[in-house]
Image: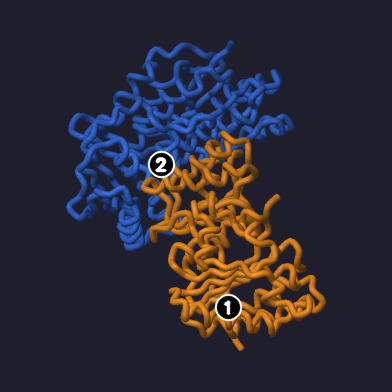
Chain colours: A orange, B blue
């Protein structure tokens, strides 16, 4: 059987998508899962977060989106389901129970006349359960069976990449047809700017020229504010003007942090080399690896 | 503090080179200076042999790759100076040009003149070589006006024909440019989004068989000039392009009067400043950049070879 994956940003997820998301820190998780929750709450979807940690585990919707989760919990649009009620039987991870719960939630949401249903669960803990990886994979298959045929539900299975082995991550990835990533900061069809977290920076795609210097500066500032090295993934950038290169060098110069251009086209690398007396050592060419 | 000594030797035969250049180089070597020799292949071979083992301490470069166009040549010298920041510098500089179009001769004359300003405070002795037998009289004349010192034999003397850089440079970028040919294609630029301009330029450049790397250079250079016109010029702005022998020419015009400094964009901008980068980058990418500005508007014409 041919395997294929679609990569979508949170905003592009469609009903029937059972998406996979691995994160490596709280900010990355908040960015992606926060957008997933926000889009659902703002768009009158039923939103279900399966976690034992209560509302404390939710991304910070207040500061990011000025949304009050308590209000949505009271109205029933947002539900936080503890693991004990959804996927444990006698304290043991039970994939069959999880799929039954999910089906029930979907059916109820339909009768409650929500436009759609969004479900997210952090599967990291399940790896450390008795059946470990096999249990997780079985569970994933069942979630897939519940979500994929649905015309109103979408799900994100989260996993903390730091606490799984590469084999576990690969096995999980293969259970999902959709990989979900961060929404772009900016996308107008000519240029898209998307935050990246491993390594931290921006992925630029399309064409960057003077008409978009302002949005680029704004996005760059968000990364800079976080501190540390800044990686700019340029693999899909067809064009960049000298002004934008100068802005990148300027960011490095004034911050003392490194700005690394990852995967530039041969021509872009040539340009940087040609004007190197001006741009280097402020800019470095890289291959996407944090050093 | 010693400043730049910029002198010229117009030679008639190889003996002149050995009599003058060899002692010039040896003097620098014995003083522990950073020594660079840029020359034509036969002259480099001749000097290497004459220097013997001393040649190990000299950096050699071929004129053909060093003197591609003025902005890159200045960048090459700037790099050499930066790499030898603590030493006094000694350079033998043979451009190796024999002839060129009127525009090229005028650019190279301006280049020699800019050297006097750009490197005025560098502690360096520079000896430029011109072969009187093969060099275009126009270039020789330009060299006479742009070197404060003349070398004759082993003696240097003040050059009476030397002109102040401001006077030399005022003569360049002044004559009207020939009008674009009837076959030139034209695109108005009325939006800050330059993606359509790049499609236009890229499409026509491919049609003329321009190589992919040169098309990319042309797109970067044109975008820069158009951005400058949008930000600092006045509407209407338009772009025209046409073929001229082996070059493609792209011209951007606007109705504004660019109050540029006299020699904008030839010298690598200070790395610590964020201004002055654009036009310098454009000059680095193009074989020739012609700038005309006045009360009637501003024209920037870029020449890039198709291959």
Question: The N terminus of chain B lies in which quarter of the figure?
Answer: top right
Q: Write down the quadrant of residue A121 in the picture.
A: bottom right
Q: How many tags in the picture?
A: 2
Identify the chain of the residue marked 1, using the numbered disc in the image. A
Mark 1 residue element: loop
Looking at the picture, tell me which residue is in the foreground, B159 or B229.
Answer: B229
**Quarter assignment of residue A289:** bottom right
Quadrant in which the C terminus of chain B is drawn: bottom left
Q: Nearer the viewer, mark 2 or mark 1?
A: 1
Q: Which mark is residue A177?
A: 1
Residue B275 horizontal/vertical position (percent)? 44, 32
The circle on residue B282 is 2
Query: Is residue A140 shown above or below B122?
Result: below
Residue pictured at 62% horizontal, 25% vertical = B22
Q: Confirm whether circles 2 and 1 share one chain.
A: no
Estimate the spatial distance between the alpha carbons at disc 2 and disc 1, rounded to whole Å.
Answer: 46 Å
């Amino acid at each position: 059987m041919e395997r294929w994956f679609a990569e979508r940003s949170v905003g592009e997820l469609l009903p029937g998508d059972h998406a996979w998301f691995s994160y490596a820190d709280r900010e990355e998780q908040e960015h992606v899962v926060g957008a997933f929750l926000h889009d659902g709450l703002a768009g009158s979807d039923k939103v279900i977060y399966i976690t034992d940690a209560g509302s404390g585990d939710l991304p910070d919707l207040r500061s990011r989106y000025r949304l009050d989760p308590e209000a949505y919990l009271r109205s029933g649009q947002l539900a936080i389901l503890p693991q004990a009620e959804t996927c444990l039987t006698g304290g043991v991870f039970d994939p069959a129970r999880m799929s039954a719960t999910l089906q029930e939630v979907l059916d109820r949401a339909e009768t409650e006349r929500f436009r759609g249903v969004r479900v997210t669960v952090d599967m990291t803990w399940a790896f450390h359960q008795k059946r470990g990886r096999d249990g997780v994979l079985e569970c994933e298959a069942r979630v897939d069976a519940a979500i994929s045929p649905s015309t109103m539900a979408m799900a994100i299975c989260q996993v903390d990449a730091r606490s799984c082995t590469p084999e576990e991550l690969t096995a999980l990835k293969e259970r999902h047809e959709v990989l979900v990533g961060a929404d772009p900061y900016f996308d107008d069809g000519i240029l898209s700017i998307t935050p990246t977290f491993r390594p931290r920076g921006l992925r630029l795609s399309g064409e960057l020229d003077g008409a978009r210097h302002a949005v680029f500066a704004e996005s760059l500032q968000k990364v800079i504010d976080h501190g540390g090295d800044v990686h700019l993934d340029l693999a899909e950038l067809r064009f960049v003007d000298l002004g934008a290169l100068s802005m990148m060098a300027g960011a490095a110069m004034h911050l003392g942090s490194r700005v690394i251009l990852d995967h530039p086209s041969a021509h872009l690398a040539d340009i940087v080399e040609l004007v190197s007396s001006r741009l280097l050592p402020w800019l470095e060419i890289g291959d996407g690896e944090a050093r | 503090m010693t400043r730049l000594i910029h002198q010229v030797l117009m030679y008639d035969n190889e003996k002149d080179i050995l009599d003058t250049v060899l002692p010039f180089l040896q003097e620098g070597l014995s003083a522990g200076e950073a020594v660079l020799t840029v020359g034509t292949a036969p002259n480099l071979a001749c000097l290497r042999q004459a220097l013997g083992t001393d040649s190990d301490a000299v950096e050699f470069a071929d004129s053909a790759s060093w003197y591609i166009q003025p902005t890159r040549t200045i960048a090459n010298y700037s790099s050499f100076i930066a790499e030898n920041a603590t030493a006094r510098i000694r350079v033998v500089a043979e451009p190796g040009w024999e002839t060129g179009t009127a525009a090229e001769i005028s650019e190279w004359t301006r280049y020699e003149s800019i050297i006097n300003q750009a490197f005025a405070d560098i502690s360096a002795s520079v000896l430029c070589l011109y072969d009187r037998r093969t060099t275009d009289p126009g270039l020789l004349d330009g060299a006479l006006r742009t070197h404060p010192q003349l070398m004759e034999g082993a003696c240097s003397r003040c050059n009476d024909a030397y002109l102040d850089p401001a006077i030399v440079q005022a003569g360049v970028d002044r004559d009207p440019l020939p009008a674009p040919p009837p076959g030139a294609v034209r695109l108005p630029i009325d939006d800050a989004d330059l993606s359509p301009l790049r499609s236009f330029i890229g499409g026509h450049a491919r049609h003329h068989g321009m190589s992919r790397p040169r098309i990319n250079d042309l797109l970067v250079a044109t975008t820069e000039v158009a951005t400058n016109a949008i930000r600092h010029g006045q509407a209407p702005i338009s772009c025209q392009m046409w073929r001229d022998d082996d070059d493609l020419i792209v011209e951007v015009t606007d109705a504004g009067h660019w109050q540029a400094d006299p020699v904008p964009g030839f010298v690598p901008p200070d790395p610590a400043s964020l201004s002055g980068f654009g036009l310098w980058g454009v000059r680095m990418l193009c074989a020739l950049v012609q700038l005309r500005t006045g009360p009637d508007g501003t024209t920037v014409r870029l020449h890039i070879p198709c291959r």
